[in-house]
Amino acid sequence: MEKPDVLSRTVKAARKIVVKIGSNTIANADGSINRDFMNKLADDTADLIKSGKQVVIVSSGAGIAGIATINKWKRKSDLHYKQALCAIGQVELMDSYRKAFAAHDIHVAQILLTNEDFSDTNRTLHIRNTLFTLVDEGVVPVINENDSVSVDEIKIGDNDNLAALTSNLWDADLLILLSDIDGVYDRNPKEFPDAALIETVTDSTEILGRIHAGATNGFGTGGIVTKIQAAIKVNAFGIPMVLTNGKVPGVLARLFGESTRATIFLPEDDDE
Ligand code: ADP
């Protein structure tokens, strides 16, 4: 039998998995929530849970969902309008998650966090306990930054880093980032069609100096740089990270099944 590659071996060995879903994956081009994606995500997550895995979701998309809901505020760029849009969109987002997971008799739970929550020992303890309790009871936590209270000083700023902090806090075995690209390329694949996919990264800090990081795409906030920052954070805790394309139908099932195109970031002692 052929020896499974490092990607397939790593994802199959992981039991506690954080899945982060980027704005471009969760939303259609008009900003409305992509229900087909959401339903398939729920199907695949339910299958993972049945197979004995535990899943925590970190989801972007509140701001976009807010704009799609309250069309008339589209052009208002003031901070308080942006924060109000997130408050509206977060409800739409959670409503979609609730419906998609209800089809599998799985409950979802919302946790909204800011940077401050990760620097206060008391708060981190409570977040940890809540996460452990929810997951032990078969509930899927859906985490997002609390954009309505976050101003620059206390902001994590992007959900890639939030997902990394969550992975470290929960002692995850694997972080999966679902974006709109197959992985990290030597150059931005949206600008350079001949960009080459880097399938395995064994030094997540070094890779930053080796690639050309282009602009973010569509609704994206962090771009490739914050994804590599996330890898640096989790790898330092011995947790591998996979970046792959959420636009690939059934991407999670493929990743845990016959495999799909991706970049895996391996912690130092895991790179054989
Ligand atoms: P998300 O909403 O999923 O977090 P972002 O738009 O923030 O996604 O980041 C992903 C984008 O980063 C890709 O669509 C791509 O255009 C861009 N990007 C820039 N440079 C690179 C690179 N070297 N490799 C991969 N993607 C890159």
Image (cartoon, rainbow, N blue to C red):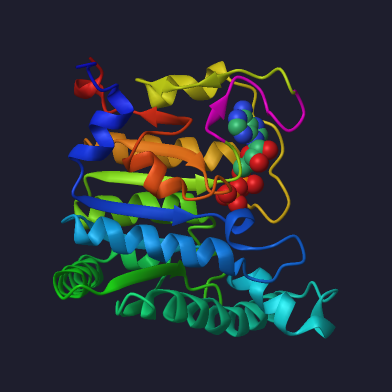
Q: Residue at x 15, y 56 (%)?
A: 52
- The answer to whether 3 appears left or right of 215 in the picture is left
| Image quadrant where one finds the N terminus | top left
Which residue is depicted at the point 80% across and 81% down?
Answer: 71
- x%, y% of residue 95? 50, 83
Residue sitting farthest toward the front: 1
Q: Would you place residue 251 above or below residue 115 in this image? A: above
Q: Residue 160 in the image: state x and y as whole percent.
A: 47, 50
User: What secondary structure prevails in the magenta region?
Assistant: loop
In this picture, is 118 found above or below 164?
A: below
Splitting the image into 4 quarters, where does residue 112 fall?
A: bottom left
Based on the picture, tell me whether residue 94 belongs to the magenta stretch: no
Q: Quadrant of the C terminus?
A: top left
Q: Is residue 258 left or right of residue 183?
A: left
**Residue 40 in the image: x percent, y percent?**
47, 61
Q: Is residue 62 left or right of residue 270?
A: right
Residue 237 appears anywhere in the view = no
Q: Residue at x 51, y 66 (%)?
A: 38
Tally of numbered discs:
0
Q: Is residue 184 magenta?
A: yes
Q: Name the quadrant containing residue 123.
A: bottom left
**Residue 187 occupies which quadrant of the picture?**
top right
Q: Tell me what residue is drawn at x 62 percent, y 70 percent.
A: 33
Residue 120 visible in the current orientation: yes
Left/right placement of residue 225 relative to residue 206 reads: right
- Residue 28 placed where, x, y %? 69, 62
Quarter holding ligand 1: top right
Report the front residue among 231 and 184: 184
Residue span colored magenta: 182-192
